[in-house]
Amino acid sequence: MESKQKFLVLLRVNPSKAENFIAALMRLTEMPAEGVKLIASYNILGKWDCAVWFEASDNDSAVHFIGEKLRSIGGVTETITMPATLIKQYRM
């Protein structure tokens, strides 16, 4: 994948379906859609329940992945997507 455009997707999940949602998310492969590479997924606290970082070769690939893969997982009630552009990468 040539492009390094990264995206952050925040997901809200129905609490009664959270366990099944996590199981489905864990079954996604590193390359779950054409032009998309998963970087990481996190449980988060607050208004949102889960964060998914991924790279996409173009916006169409990103939109397809979010609509066809993430939003289709049972229990997802809301998503918000933010493209991210690197300012500086810090290393330890």
Image (spheres, rainbow, N blue to C red):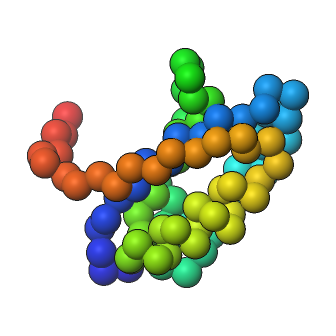
Q: Tell me residue 83's x, y (percent).
A: 34, 55
What residue lies at 82% left-to-right and 49% top-to-bottom?
Answer: 74
What residue lies at 40% left-to-right and 55% top-to-bottom?
Answer: 7
Q: Quadrant of the N terminus?
A: bottom left
What residue lies at 64% left-to-right and 42% top-to-bottom?
Answer: 78
How many labels were placed on the picture? 0
Of all residues shown, which one is farthest toward the top?
46
Q: Tell me residue 59's x, y (percent).
A: 40, 72
Q: Up-down: is 37 above or below 23?
A: below
Horizontal side of residue 90 vs 46, given as left or right? left
Of all residues shown, which one is farthest toward the left?
88
Q: Tell me residue 22's x, y (percent).
A: 74, 41
Q: Is residue 23 visible?
A: no
Quadrant in the rendering for residue 64: bottom right
Q: Tell me residue 92's x, y (percent).
A: 20, 34
Q: Is residue 83 visible?
A: yes
Quadrant in the rendering for residue 27: bottom right
